[in-house]
Image (cartoon, rainbow, N blue to C red):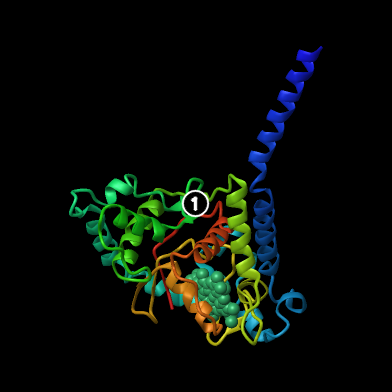
Amino acid sequence: MLSKIVKSTAFLALTVCALNAADFNAKAEKDRIEAVKYFEAKFADPEKNKDKFFPYATDDELKNDYEKNLKHDDFNIGTYAYSKDAKSQYEAIKEMPPYESDIETGEALYNKKFANGKSFATCFPDPAVTNMYPYFDEKKKDVVTLTSAVNDCLRDNGEKEWDTKKGDIANLQAYLVNATTEAGKKFDIKIQSEAAKKAYEAGKEYYYTQRGYLKMSCATCHIQGAGQRVRNEKLSPLVGQITQFPVYRLKWESLGTIERRLSGCIVDQGQVAPKDESTQMKELIYFIAYISNGMAIDGPDIRK
Ligand code: HEC
């Protein structure tokens, strides 16, 4: 009898453990599905849904410049998903992608030997893995982004770390991301522990926190505001927001990392951006990337 009780409690404990392991991403998964539903509803028919989602847009713009019936994967190209005019300009530029040579430079950097004879190929034996970044390092109890992984590789091999916004780092990332795109991989961000779940929650908190005298958050512009026009661009949606980075921006006249873009948005709100390899920045990217789970990696790309 006793052994039976012991056995059944052991069984129960095991089941509870197994349930918990599967559960760490339950809340995040709910967030992700809700976000996709929200954007699909919002962009099913902007003209018809004017009162609900676009009270300030003109009838003419809603009728003529918005795509209809957008589905999950359409959001991969950010703002270009819904604006007909911006999309045709985007497609024209993509015929002669300005980042082709950057991918080649990145490939050379990937193969170049460090002073100790190793190379990035030692740290990233398979270059087509950027769909798994950021990930949560359970030993370090910290998020590892593609950018911090590249610099970790340099530091671990006695090399000098790189600038985290442009130049070599963006070129190397362009090569890795391009390889991942060609391999047809989808974002696959995991949350497998209590600590990882906390990191996701912290990133989410950052995204929703209101800042500056206008009390705006990332969500004000990229969830509620997504699709609305700011100057000559429509705001991109949270879903699919970083699937194409690094990007070549016409404004920058060069390729830049996701950190470069995020810092821009934070500075535009009159705030000081967290350092690119800080826990805060890494958690923010972890949250955004998780919400794009299931979407294809599709970079590098171009932006205005
Ligand atoms: C005042 C509005 C505003 C706020 C607040 C804001 N952004 Fe942006 N953001 C923009 C505009 C405008 C663009 C350029 C158009 C676009 O692609 O959305 C942009 C672009 C981006 C992009 C590039 C999307 C792409 O596909 O190229 C990302 C990523 C982004 N923002 C993230 C954030 C994050 C994270 C925050 C909060 C820390 C934030 N933004 C806060 C206005 C804002």
What type is the residue that disc 1 sits on?
A: Tyr
Q: Which quarter of the image is occupied by the N terminus?
A: top right
Please tell me how crowded label 1 is: few (under 14), some (14-19), or many (20+) other residues with Cα within 10 Å: many
Q: Which quarter of the rendered image does ligand 1 occupy?
A: bottom right
Residue 84 makes an appearance in the image: no
Q: Is residue 165 above or below residue 279?
A: below
Left or right position of 186 against 169: right
In front of the other: 272 or 245: 272
Q: Which quarter of the image is occupied by the C terminus?
A: bottom left
Left or right position of 280 against 252: right
- Point 55% across, 48% down: residue: 190
Give the image quarter of residue 164: bottom left
- Point 69% across, 37% down: residue: 19
Disc 1 is placed on an element classified as strand
In front of the other: 121 or 115: 115
Count the numbered circles shown: 1
- Point 18% across, 54% down: residue: 115
- Point out the residue furthest to the front here: 2
Percent across and percent down for residue 161 are: 30, 63
